[in-house]
Amino acid sequence: MLQKNLLHWYDRNKRDLPWRHTGDPYSIFVSEMMLQQTQVKTVIPYYERFLKELPDWKALAKAKEEKVLKLWEGLGYYRRARNLQAAAQKILADHQGLLPDSMEEILEIPGVGPYSAGAVLSIAFQKPHPVVDGNVIRVFSRLFLLRGNLKTGEGHKKVWELAENLISRQRPGDFNQAVMELGATVCLPENPQCLLCPLLSGCLAAQKGLQGELPEMPKATPVLEVPMAALYLEQKGRVLVKKRAQNERWLKGMWEFPSAEGKTYEEALQKLETHLRVKAHRKELNEVKHQITHHKIRLKLFGGITPKSLRVSKDLKWVPLKKLRDLPFASAQNKLREWVLQKSS
Ligand code: SF4
């Protein structure tokens, strides 16, 4: 009954989204990678541009990493973009350019975990594998009155078991999407729209008026402040930028005004001065804030004195200001870039 009501509701109410018009495993895979931790309306233009530029596994596998990151610029969690390209390369090398349709094999593809495996196998191949994300947790916690932490450990396992038992064998992809759609549009975190819900008659939380209390959240990880300094060096209309190395903890492969973290801004600046062999001014030009997971980054931009012979290594280059937007910059550094471009226009 639950499946029937939910699928009936989904058929009439699902949002018209571009990846719902295709059965192509590549397009579905791309959409699932983009949708992780990102809202649907943010993803749509990225998805369309990405598929236009890189329409299949081969194009993605052979593209320059910089092009993939540029197409991802602003979407955040850039590891997804690098994994997506690594996935395409593996699919080309090991699977004759076809996405595998078994759980065992798909879990070996870079960036694929239990959630994306279930989503892709059910939506692209109609295999009855469930999915559990934040929306599914919220809907099930209310429907079955599940208390405690459902995001990890035993509670999380319980939600997976329920999803496994409930999934429609005839329409697994639609069933998974229907639960997530219900969570995204009706069973909202605040003010769930129970009177519009196709599952109201069987919902234990709604019967007891407990919707607002569920799901119970695990204790949030404390937020850590991270002081970060970036350096703006200009020379004859060109500006110094740096590609973040593969051993950085965040934003590998993205470009930026050279930056460093420290316990203090002074420490961060000293690191930059030593690394680049330049002298930085101590008065900041601008400051932007950004959060990555539980790290609150306060990024300050400082000017500096450009020495006559600054050593430019492989990861550093001078770029004409008008070409600065050609490079992939992540969120906080992008704000600084826009500020610099506006100032110099
Ligand atoms: S009845 Fe309300 S609380 Fe229950 S699943 Fe539907 S929207 Fe969520």
Image: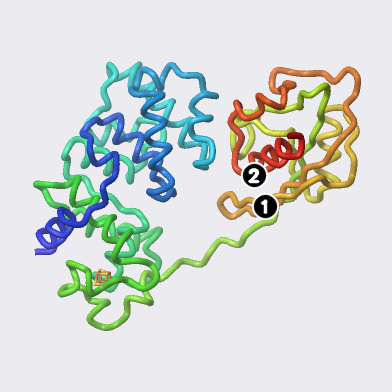
State whether residue 192 appears in this view. yes
Sequence-earlier tag: 1 or 2: 1
Residue at point 51%, 24% (across, down): 67
Assess mark 2: CB under 8 A from ligand 1? no
Quadrant hosting residue 120: top left
Q: Is residue 274 left or right of residue 27?
A: right
Residue 233: image location, x then y, percent = 81, 30
Residue 316: x and y, percent?
72, 23
Q: Camera-side residue: 284 or 30? A: 284
**What amino acid type is highlighted by mark number 1?**
Lys
Tell me which residue sits at (33%, 42%) in the image.
116
Amino acid at dot 2: Ala
Q: Which mark is residue 332?
A: 2
Relative to residue 68, is residue 345 drawn left or right? right
Q: Regarding ligand 1, which quadrant of the image does it lie in? A: bottom left
Q: Is residue 165 visible?
A: no
Placement of 211 over or under 25, stated as above or below: below
> Would you say 234 lies left or right of 179 here?
right
- Neighbour class for label 1 at 10 Å: few (<14), some, many (≥20)? some
Ligand 1 within 8 angstroms of badge 1 C-beta: no
Q: Position of residue 101 (x, y in %)?
A: 22, 31
Q: Secondary structure at mark 2?
A: helix
Can you identify the residue that label 1 sits on?
A: 289
Q: Are marks 1 and 2 in contact (CB under 8 Å)?
A: yes
Q: Could you say where residue 313 lies in the image, as x and y percent from the top left?
A: 75, 18
Helix, strand or loop for disc 1: strand
Residue at image location 91% in from the left, 19% down from the top: 308
Image quarter in which the N terminus is found: bottom left
